[in-house]
Image (cartoon, helix red, strand yellow):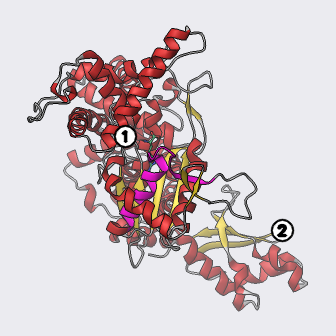
Amino acid sequence: MRKLQELITEEVRAAFEAAGFDPALGQVVLSNRPDLCEYQCNGAMAGAKALHRPPFEIADAVAEKLSDSQVFEKAESVKPGFLNLTLRPEYVRQYLVKMLHEKKFGLEMPAHAPKIIIDYGGANVAKPLHVGHLRPAIIGESLKRILRYAGNDVTGDIHMGDWGLQIGLVITELKHRRPELPWFDEAYSGAYPKEPPFTMEEFGEMYPTASAKSKASETDSEEDKAAAAAYKAEAMEATKRLQDGDRAYRDLWKKIMAVSLPNLRKNYDSLHVTFDLWRGESDVQELIPGMLDYFRQNGYAHESRGALVIDVAEESDTKEMPPCIVRKSDGASLYATTDLATIQERMGEFRPDMMIYITDKRQALYFEQVFRAAKKSRLALPETTLTFIGHGTMNGKDGHPFKTRDGGVMKLESLIGDTEREMTERIKASDTDMSGEEAEKTAKQIALAAIKYGDLSNQPSKDYIFDLEKFTSFEGDTGPYILYTIVRIKSILKKYEEQGKSAKDALLAAPGTAAEKSLSLQLTRFADAVEGAARELAPNRICAYIYELANTFNTFYHETKILAEPDDEKRQSYIALISMTRRLLETGIDLLGFEAPDRM
Ligand code: ARG
């Protein structure tokens, strides 16, 4: 369905034309003086010079043509030459009714759904998820939902880091602890035990231990430095053996995956983050030798000091653009090798129109290299859009990357746990008749809203400060405020239905009061927000829209007696209006990846 702003622009264009001016001047925009009017048109100002006429004369002539419009209650020419526009309430009502009858509130769908793959999450197997994994997961999940809602055919892939040094480190640590295990017996040819050779607890601690052992600091003794270097060399050797297909190490890898995956799933589930594909770096290993041959044979890559590289610099570059290394001199493949092979696989399997990658913005240069290499080597088609979204850092109140109290890396689970505890306390402190169980469930829902909204209300590329107190507040531009508003509406609707009436059948009337009109107008702008968010890949546009909607609703709520309104027609209309508000707010938070409780 056409957007309201487009429709009224058409009306004003026709008036410009009827008055003898260029219709292109009739573009309507939101009013920057909402106290005076709802929309405005600055076309007379823009056209005055070319027309050799004072702007107010043009505006007067256009206003004259709009005087009996079915769209505008008021079209006023004001000096020096603006057109101030106010819509007829009945026109707004009809527009809202139409929205309610259409799918997705009239959001227009593309004729052919573009195929999009979103690569987000990027968890590394065997390592615990830490706060650094929060942003790509939250942003990616929201973008997936927004793009899907906007009519694209979207597939989300977690693209796990499941093939790198961290696996070699865990294997090495295991070998040091239990060299007697059959996996480390070269002569062993039987079947390996089914059970993993470590408990969950042990596994959780093995990677951090191994990682620490493989690193030495400046102040360490020579002996310790040598030990760390030897340990790391061992881990690299183990990684290489795994990648070369060693039977024992492949089996251990499977055990590591089997223990790691449920844990990852649990973490992502608690964030309401789901993936259509649980693929990873390991899935494309078979493709690598053929791909490297293809690069060489077609002259896309060349040897450089033993390594195989693709030159990706372009003449227009203003910054240095190093070549993309696709094979190291020792024959090992790298991060870029797997990413290129993954592009090849995705093109073959899905032929996407677009691939979107979400990681920390420090990977920007890397992805530029990979994208150029993919285009140059024709792994991706010229028309395939490859997009990188680099997110900023989540900082603590001190402005530095978020840490635990003692300065360590904070696990994602702890962050979520802390927020949930804070929320539970707030709920229990407010006088509530909720049972402990309901309070806890509600606290979880609000905590998730607090975390996600706190993140998504910023532009993805910006750093932000994780401020628990602010994020969990029921007032201001926060997730809990939005939830509170939804709960408020739900409770009014419930009371209305308890009077034996049906909110669904309530009829919308033309808005009477100013607050009612503002709320109605804000509802009409839903599609602009969703389209904008999808086009700019910006969930923050959805946040801004629903925040404004919640504010407009709350003003209406404070100025209007809804259930106590004696006039049945008006009361029904209020109910219809707030039901629609609720539906749009709920759709909005669903696009952000969280939901509202029934009460709070
Ligand atoms: N595992 C990577 C990391 O932790 C993120 C993966 C992002 N996706 C990709 N296709 N490279 O940095």
Q: Which residues are magenta?
A: 323-347
Q: Secondary structure at mark 2?
A: loop
Who's the residue at 55% across and 80% down the image?
Answer: 70
Who's the residue at 57% across and 75% down the image?
Answer: 6
Q: Say what amino acid the circle numbered 2 marks.
A: Lys
Residue 479 point in image, percent of width and height: 45, 38
Who's the residue at 49% across and 30% down the image?
Answer: 471
Residue 337 point in image, percent of width and height: 45, 52
Instruction: Find the distance from the CA under tag 1 to the CA under tag 2.
Output: 43 Å
Q: Secondary structure at mark 1?
A: helix
Residue highlighted by disc 1: 488
Residue highlighted by disc 2: 79
Residue 333 among those drawn in magenta: yes
Q: Residues within 10 Å of mark 2 (few under 14, many from 20)?
A: few
Residue 429 point in image, percent of width and height: 36, 17
Question: Is 61 drawn above or below residue 159 in the view shown?
Answer: below
Residue 28 point in image, percent of width and height: 66, 72
Residue 492 among those drawn in magenta: no
Q: Nearer the viewer, residue 493 or 476?
A: 476
Figure quarter occupied by ligand 1? top left
Question: Is 495 drawn above or below residue 172 in the view shown?
Answer: below
Closer to the N terminus: mark 1 or mark 2? 2
